[in-house]
Amino acid sequence: MSERYNVQVTETKWQQYWQENQSFRAITDPTRPKHYTLSMLPYPSGRIHMGHVRNYTLGDVVARYKRALGFNVLHPMGWDAFGLPAENAARKSNTDPATWTYDNIKNMKAELVRMGLSLDWERELATCDASYYKHQQKLFLDFLKQGLVYRKEAWANWDPVDNTVLANEQVIDGRGWRSGALVEKKLLSQWFFKITAYSEELLQSLKTLERWPDKVRLMQENWIGKSEGAYVQFFVAGSEDEKIEVFTTRPDTLFGASFVAISANHPFAKKLAAKNEKLAAFCTECNRTGTSIVDIEKGEKLGMDTGATVEHPFDPAWKLPVYVANFVLVEYGTGAIFGCPAHDQRDLDFARKYNLPVKAVVLPEGEDPASFTVGNEAYTGPGKAFNSDFLDGLNTEAAIKTAIKRVEEVGAGKGTVQYRLRDWCISRQRYWGCPIPIIHCDACGAVPVPEKDLPVKLPDDAEIGRPGNPLDCHPTWKHVNCPKCGKPAIRETDTCDTFVDSSWYYARYCSASCEDKPVEKADMDYWMPVDQYVGGVEHAILHLLYSRFFTRAMKACGYIDIDEPFDGLFTQGMICHESYKDEQGEWLYPEEVKKNSDGTAVHVKTGYPVNVGRVEVMSKSKKNVVDPGQIIDLYGADTARLFVLSDSPPERDIEWTEAGVEGCWRYVNRLWRCVTEPKFAIAAPDEAAPASFGDKALIVRQMTHKTIVEFTQDLEGFHFNRAVARARELSNALDELDGSGQGDGFALREGLEMLVRLLNPMLPHITEELWQQLGHRVPLVKSIWPKADPALLVETSATIAVQVNGKLRATIQIAKDADKATMETAALGQEGVKRALEGLSVKKIIIVPNKIVNIVAA
RNA sequence: GCGGGCAUGGCGAAAUCGGUAGACGCAUCAGACUUAAAAUCUGAAGCCAGCAAUGGCGUGCCGGUUCAAGUCCGGCUGCCCGCACCA
C-alpha cells in the first residue's frame, strides 16, 4: 500500500527542481526552432484572480506542449504596473503608488510561482520600473523624429471641484465620482500617436492574420471603419466664401437633404454662438455630456436651429437650415453632416422632432414611385434614385459615382476615402505613469529631452491626495532648464496612457537584459513575432490595435523587421461571478457575504442584508472575485489548473462555482492511485510487447493510441476541455482491465504512461512524480511528446444508424467500408425496422457508407 | 445607439463534413464496504406515459430548405463583451 498523494510535498519538489535546473530559461539560439508563447501581462492589483489562473494555465499548456515538441520556448511574465488603481489606493491608505505596486507584485509573483507555470522569470519586467520606461521614453523620442507624434488640443472630462481630469470610468451619471460635481468638457493640449498613418495598412494586414479569431479581425476592421464617400461643401447663404464641409458615404441621397447639422465645437457654431446667447447656452449644454461615445449615442438627440442657411451644392437657390446637434462630433470627419431623413434613421428621428421635410430619393425594388413614402422607418438599403434630377433611374452604386463626379465638376467637393480610426491620444494628466520626455520652453517650444538625460524619472515625493495633477503641483520637479537654449523651462507634466506601456512589452521580453536600447535587433529577428498570444477578449480592439501600430512604428525606427507582433492569437472567455452590494451601495467580496438557501444574502460580520447583483465579469472594482490562493492551498496547483481547463471551452465565458473543483481533486487522486496502486502487476519499464494480446488488452491499446492522436489534435486546436474528457475516457478504459487477459500488464503500463505524458502540460507536478514512480529517470520536462502507433489506429468495424423516415429505429455493427447492398440487407433485417415499416411501403433508401441507412416509407 | 459574440438535461458541456443529440464531468438517487462517517467501488438517470417491452416529445422562439437540421437560410427574443481616459 503506497502513501496517499501529498500535494504540497510533490508540488514544492518539482517547483524547486525546475528552478534549480533553470528548466524554463530561454536562450537565444538561432540553430533551434523557437516558439514564443505569451500571456497578457497582469495588472498588479494585489492578488491573482481566476481570470489570471485561466489565462496563464492556457498559456502554460501551450508552452509545455511546444517544449515537448522540441521547440526552444520563450514564455515570460511581467507587470503592467502603471495606472489609476495605484493612485487611488495611495490616496485611500496614504502610502505611495510605488510601494503599493511593488508590494502587490511581490505577492502576486509568489502566487504565480505556486501555480507551477513554466515561466522564464529572468526576463520579468515591471512597466513602472525606470529600467523599462526609460526605453519607452526613447521610443517616444524616436517616434517623434519619425513624425509619428504630434501635439494638439483635445477634449477631456474635467472635474471643476477636484480640479482634475477624469477617466470615463470616473464619470458616473455625468458627475465626478469623488466630488459629485457636474463634469465639464475641457480642451487641453495633448500628445498623440499618429496611428492613422497606418489606417490602410492595419486594415489590409488583418487578412494575413490567419491564426487570429475571425471575430477579432472583424471587430478591428469595423473599428478602423474604412468608408468611401465624398467631402461636399455647402456655401453659407449670404456669405462670399464661408462654407461648411461635410463627409458623406451616400452622396446619391443629396437631393433628399433637408438640413445640415454641425458640432457644438465646429468653428462656425462658435462664431454664431458668439452673437447668440441661446445658441451659446445650447453649445455649453452639449459639452456637458461626457467624452464617451456611449453617452452621446444613448442620450437624447438634441438640436438647435442656428438661423443660418446654406446653399445646396447642386442648386444654389435651394436653402437648407443649419442646426447645431449634440450627436455630431467635431473629431469625426469634418464635424458636420448633411441630413437626409428618408434614408438615415437618426436623421429621420431628428427631422420628425424638428418638423423638417422628409423627401424619399431612393426607391426600393418593387415600390411605386408615386406611392412610396417613408413613415417612421428610414429606408437605408439600395434601390433606384428618383426625385433626384440627373441621378434619376440610376441604381445606388451608379448614383454614388455619378453624384461624386458632379460634386467634383461643380467644385463643391471631391470623392474620398475616410477612416473612423482616430489618432491615439496618449496624454494623461496623472502621476502614476511614464513621464513624457518633453520640456516646454517659451523660446524654443516643445523640446525633446536629450537621450543622455533619460530616464525622466517620476519624483518619489509627489503629493497624491491633493486635487489637481501631482506632477504639475510638485514644487520642483517640473522646473528645468531648456536643453536647447538653457533658459528656465517647464517639464511636460502629462504621463503616458498605460496602453503605451503594454504596446511593446512583448518585444522587451526578448531583450530583457539589454540596457542601452529598448531592444536588440538579433533578439527581435529570432524571437519575434509572438507565436501564440493568449488573453482576454476584452482586449480585442484597443490593446491589440495599439500593439500592431507600435510594431510598425518600431519598424520605421529600425528596431524590428516585421509588421505584425502576434502571429497567433487566442482570446479566452471571461470568468463571471455574482456581484454583491451592501445597503450603502458599496461592493462586497464573496467571502464577506453569506448566502441563504432562498437566494437572499447577508453580510457575514454585520448580518445586514446584501443585494445580490447580476452574474458579471469578475473585476476588482466590483469585488466579485474569488481568490485562487485558497484553492491552491486546499487542493494544489494541478487541481486548480485542471479545473480551469475542464468542462468549458476556453473561448467561452464561464461562471465560477465551487462545484467542480472537488471533481478535479478526485481525478488527480485517482490518477495517483492508478499508478501507485495498480489492481494487478504492470509490465516492467523496459519490457517488450508480448507477441499477441487478449481482446480487452487490444481494445485498450487501440484506445490509448487513438487518445494520443485526438488529445494532440485537441491541444493544437485549443480544445482543452475535450482533451481532458478524452484523458478521463482513457482512465475509464484502463479500469476495465483486470490482469487476466494476455498482455494486460503491458497494455496497462502503456496506457498509464501515455496518460501521464499527455496530461503533463496540464498537470505538470503530479505527472512528473508519477513518471518517476513508473521508473523513469529523465523527467517529462526534458521528454519528447508521444506518438501513436499507426497499426493500432486502424478501425475494422463501423456502427451504423438505421432510420425510418428520419427516426432512429436500430443500430447495426458492420464491417468497415461494407457495400451499400450489405448495409441495406442488414438494415431491413432489424426487428425495430420491421416494426416501424408495418403497413408502409418503402419509397426510397438513402445509404451513406459507414454512417447511416435512412428508409423513406409511406 | 453602434460594432462583435453566445444560447443544447438540474448544472458545465460533447456532437464543427447536414447523418445515432447529451461523450466526459458536476450535482442527485440506489447499492457495496464501514460500528458509523469520510474516502473508494458498482449501478441508475433528458422530459412525459408505461411494471415492462415500447411509444411520444426534445438543442432559446417563429418560419423555410432537405430523405435527414443543434448544425444551413430568413425573421425574432434574451444574455454577454467593446465603444477610444479602467486595465
Image (tube, rainbow, N blue to C red):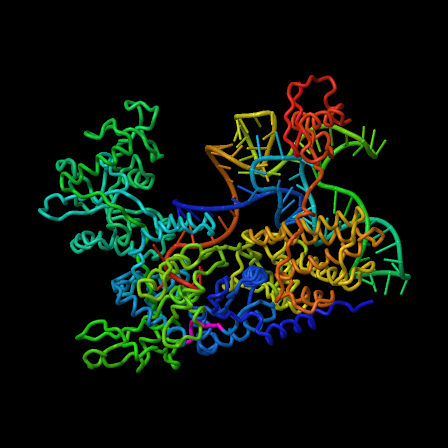
Give left or right: position of A8 versus A340: right
Q: Is residue A733 inside the magenta stretch? A: no
Give the quadrant of residue A11: bottom right
x and y, in percent, of residue A494 in the image: 32, 70
**Camera-side residue: A100 or A565?**
A565
Give the quadrant of residue A156: bottom left
x and y, in percent, of residue A261 in the image: 24, 45
Q: Which residues are magenta?
A: A123-129
**Camera-side residue: A840 or A736?**
A736
Where A852 falls versus A660 (above or below)?
A: above
x and y, in percent, of residue A185 in the image: 30, 60
Q: Is residue A128 inside the magenta stretch? A: yes
Where A525 falls versus A92 (above or below)?
A: above
Q: Residue at x 54, y 52 (%)?
A: A651
Where A453 falls versus B63 (above or below)?
A: below
Whether residue A37 appears in this view of the structure is yes
x and y, in percent, of residue A363 in the image: 30, 28
Q: Residue at x 68, y 54 (%)?
A: A727
Give left or right: position of A747 versus A406: right
**Camera-side residue: A601 or A25?**
A25
Give the quadrant of residue B55: top right
